[in-house]
Image (cartoon, rainbow, N blue to C red):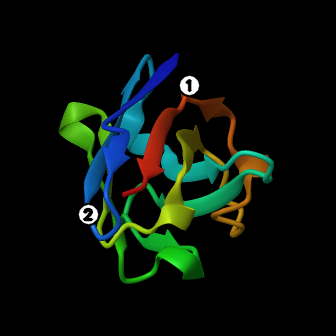
Amino acid sequence: LQLVESGGGLVQPGGSLRLSCTASGFSFEDYRIAWFRQAPGKEREGVSAITSGDQSTYYADFVKGRFTIARDNAKNTAYLQMNSLKPEDTAVYYCAMTQSLASDYLEDFWYDYWGQGTQVTVSS
């Protein structure tokens, strides 16, 4: 069971990045997927989640209108499109998966499988 993130990098404020999370060893379509991030000296925080089935999406207030989560079950891959990036978006971004039906979509407690993370740096 493995999750691999990619797509991080250095971008200027106002720029965009698309993160990918590819899963192997899972029945991918049966899992809820979320993105979390952790900045230096800060706790990990939930960014966005997408459910299995109806693919409902959820966002933290600080990314609403700027980030979009999506999934392609045929490719076992989830995406996080990040637009209008700000310096405060700088963090290591992780994808995670769960089969939990808990309604705390952005609470890391419910997620069982995690990727290794990808660094996103927003700086001029």
Residue bearing the label numbered 1: 116
Is residue 28 positioned above or below 50 on the image? above
Q: Quadrant of the C terminus?
A: bottom left
Q: Nearer the viewer, mark 1 or mark 2?
A: 2
**Disc 2: CA contacts within 10 A as few (<14), some (14-19) or many (>=20):** some
Kind of residue at disc 1: Gln
Which numbered disc, 1 or 2, marks the residue that appears first in the sequence? 2
The residue positioned farthest toward the left in the image shown: 74
Residue 86's spot in the image, x, y percent?
A: 44, 69
Relative placement, left or right, of 105 versus 104 is left
Kind of residue at disc 2: Gly
SS type, badge 1? loop
The residue drawn where x is 29% and y is 33% is 76
What separation in Å lies between label 1 and label 2 (alpha carbons)?
Answer: 24 Å
The residue drawn where x is 48% and y is 37% is 119
Q: Quadrant of residue 97?
A: top right
Residue bearing the label numbered 2: 15
**Most foreground residue, 100 or 105:** 105
**Most foreground residue, 75 or 82:** 82
The residue drawn where x is 56% and y is 65% is 88
Relative placement, left or right, of 51 versus 15 is right
Relative placement, left or right, of 37 versus 122 is right
Relative placement, left or right, of 38 versus 119 is right
Residue 16's spot in the image, x, y percent?
A: 25, 60
The residue drawn where x is 69% and y is 58% is 45
